[in-house]
Image (cartoon, rainbow, N blue to C red):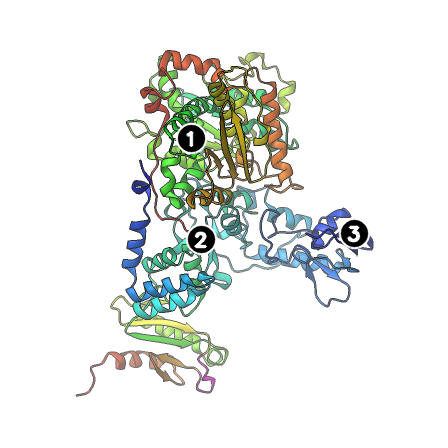
Amino acid sequence: MNPATTDNWAQVEAAAQAALTPEIVSFIAACRAKPHPESHLIAVLHRVQEHFGYLGQAQMDAVAQLLRVPAARVSGVATFYHYFRLQPRGRFMINVCMGTACYVKGADRVAARFREELGIDFGQTTTDGQFSLHDAACLGTCGLAPVVMINDKVYPRVTPDQVPGLLESLTAPAPA
Amino acid sequence: MSSELVRLTIDGNAVQVPTGTTIAKAAERVGIRIPTLCYHPYLSVPGACRVCIVDVRDIGHHMAACSTEVWEGMEVVTNTPVLRQARRDIVELILDNHPRDCQTCERDGNCELQNLAYALGVRERLFEGQRKDYPCDTRGVAVVREPNKCILCGRCIRMCAEVQNVHNLSQHGRGFRTVVTPAHGAGMDESVCIQCGQCVAVCPTAALLEQSHTERVWKALADPDLHVVVQTAPAIRATLAEGFGAPPGRATTGRMVAALRLLGFDVVFDTVFGADLTIVEEAHELLTRLKAGGPLPMLTSCSPAWINYLEKFYPQLIPHASTCRSPMTMTSVLTRTYYAEQRGLRPEQIYMVAVMPCVAKKYEAARPEHRDAQGRPYTDAVLTTRELIWMLKAAGIDLWALDNVDLSAYPNEHFDAPLGIATGAGTIFGATGGVTEATLRTAAVQLTGDPQARVEFRETRGVPGLREFDVTLGDRTLHVGIANGTGNASELLELVVRGERTFHVLEMMACPGGCVGGAGQPYPPRALRSHLDSLLQLRAETLYELDGQSEHRRSHENPAVRTLYREYLGQPGSPKAHELLHTHYRAQLPRGIA
């Protein structure tokens, strides 16, 4: 046996590169050239999510190999921060504000209705890829509580009964 | 640490300690052991659990004794009603979301959380807290996880990262939903885990345990059609007594053998025989490589977690590993072949149990490389020292009570021939540096041609994790490195990879202290934590003492090994020896990042 036959780095590196984009691969290489490359982990993960819409296992493992940060650290960081998504995002990103003001005004009942109508829990996406449901800590518009944000649009003073109509209006074909 | 002294008082007692000493360590100087939970002397200090809080004059809040360094004139108070209540509250809160199954828990009686709750005076459970409801990861071939019993102290994470340089475990999620798992919540066997089990050794509760093999051994012992053979690793005789209340450092070879017979094993073999055989093969391999010019350094191969580390973290160096199977597997293979033929037994009648100080041996036994042509593992079951202690207790066998028992009904307290005949050289395999010393004893004779060549190589002894020295045998000088703990191993490997040092032999053991500090060894007595150098030293000295008393102290002088070569294997390194005693390794995924 010789080292060339037992070393698998070339395959591991190629697989890691294939799981990412050339831009992200060179961004990681640039991070590696700086002191404390591991401190750039979150910046790298942001780029991955920006491109892929979420952090898949293959992408996280690829980041681990190329940035030389243990995979458990990468997935630990990814699961700690609310901002990082581990599943693909739906076409409509529904953020139900669960901040104090919204909660007092019944956000939990609004959230329950969304879960019921969509058949998914927080952090999940419907199987048709249309809706993702998330809870937000505070969207900063407490005067409009309870607040729901769908993609970039804010919906004020939402009641549970409005939820089915709201969902229908999103997927309804646009008026000609 | 500076030698400058700091004066302070602890509960009114004046004490002087060097700058940089923590309050907890200073308190030990006046005989006060402040309770701790997340703290572990071998690991970094996170100061996370706050169980060790004390009061310091003029400081408005409690301070963590494990992580706060003393200062000049400090006045520490460790014992007030408020402090006792606060510590108790902290532990009660942990208990509030901990399963209430102490009586059926594997750690009942030696759980640090249970001991702490008792010591702090928790006598009732006031609140019913929210429970965790994670699935148990019982799939691991060597290590199983029970996250519902995890108290998030982080010792396993720190052990895996700081000492083993594996970084397999991390906290995932946050807040109450935080859970310690490998990357992506994968099972241990799908992760970068090297199966060393050191996470099990430092876990204060039963959140991490070895995969149990006791049930299958009970079943085999009860089966009249099976010829049940047991072998015990060198390090077991140095630690088994601890499980029966003896202080560390008491050897129990004879009683252990008698106890195994009482338990019902048909034959008791000694893994030390396999160790002697390993030495003869490995010394032959080393001399062949020295003549051929490589590949050097030769890396030892008896520690399965170390081998797994090599395969996952340094696959480019796999050709350097000795091809010798471990002493355990050599003994198992020869039991199913050589011994079976001698006794006229069919190989499938033999049930092979190995008692190991090791969690990773369960993994080694299951590896495809160590199975027979029918796919059956050569070693059917691997019991840790802890598992054997429990089995003996379950069967009512008290190691000390054997003193007063008439054992004449049993053949003897000696291992059975032929695979129970062993030398002192094989015995010291259980301590870090022991494999090297045993190899040097045999290599010295072969390189100098003097059968009485040097027998003791004291430079190999001691528990530090990283050692390096030159040894001259005849006209050759060998540069030897010894590492225990895979973090230390990787330091030596980095020197090799970067071409900064030319070693001839590297002895690598995955566990701190070698097998005496193996992850399957008894949890230490309450006053001693695992991995304290003093504990490892005591266990190691026991093995060196046994070596000193041995009739034969060089592996190649083992009469049973000589007979084996004469009757069965031919020469060391012969085709038959290769077929039975050697193996090969390969890169394994996921690739580790250290």
**Above/below status of A12 relative to B296:** below
For marks 2 and 1, the one nearer the N-term is 2
In the displayed structure image, the side of residue A98 where residue A10 appears, left or right: left
- Kindly identify the amino acid type of the residue bearing the numbered disc 2: Thr
Q: Which mark is residue B16?
A: 3
Residue at 74% of width from left, 66% of height from top?
Answer: B59
Magenta residues, as a range?
A139-145
Mark 1 Cα within 10 Å, few/some/many (few <14, many 20+)? many
Q: In this figure, which residue is indicated by the disc labeled 2? A: B181
Q: Nearer the viewer, residue A115 or B142?
A: B142
Q: x%, y% of residue B478?
A: 49, 30
**Above/below status of A102 relative to B311:** below
**Above/below status of B177 relative to B194:** below
Q: x%, y% of residue B348?
A: 33, 22
In the displayed structure image, the side of residue B317 where residue B425 appears, left or right: right
Residue at 38% of width from left, 57% of height from top?
Answer: A64
In the displayed structure image, the side of residue B48 where residue B592 appears, left or right: left
Q: Are marks 3 and 1 on the same chain?
A: yes
Label 1 marks which chain's residue? B
Q: CA distance from mark 2 to mark 1?
A: 27 Å
Residue at 34% of width from left, 66% of height from top?
Answer: A48
**In the rendered structure, are the residues bearing label 2 and label 3 in contact, judged by CB atoms less than 8 Å apart?**
no
Q: In this figure, which residue is indicated by the disc labeled 1? A: B381
Secondary element type, mark 1: strand
Q: Nearer the viewer, residue B88 or A161?
A: B88
User: Does residue B587 appear in the picture of this structure?
Assistant: yes
Q: Nearer the viewer, residue B314 or B363?
A: B314
Inspect the magenta stretch and tell me whether residue A141 lies in it.
Answer: yes
Secondary element type, mark 3: strand
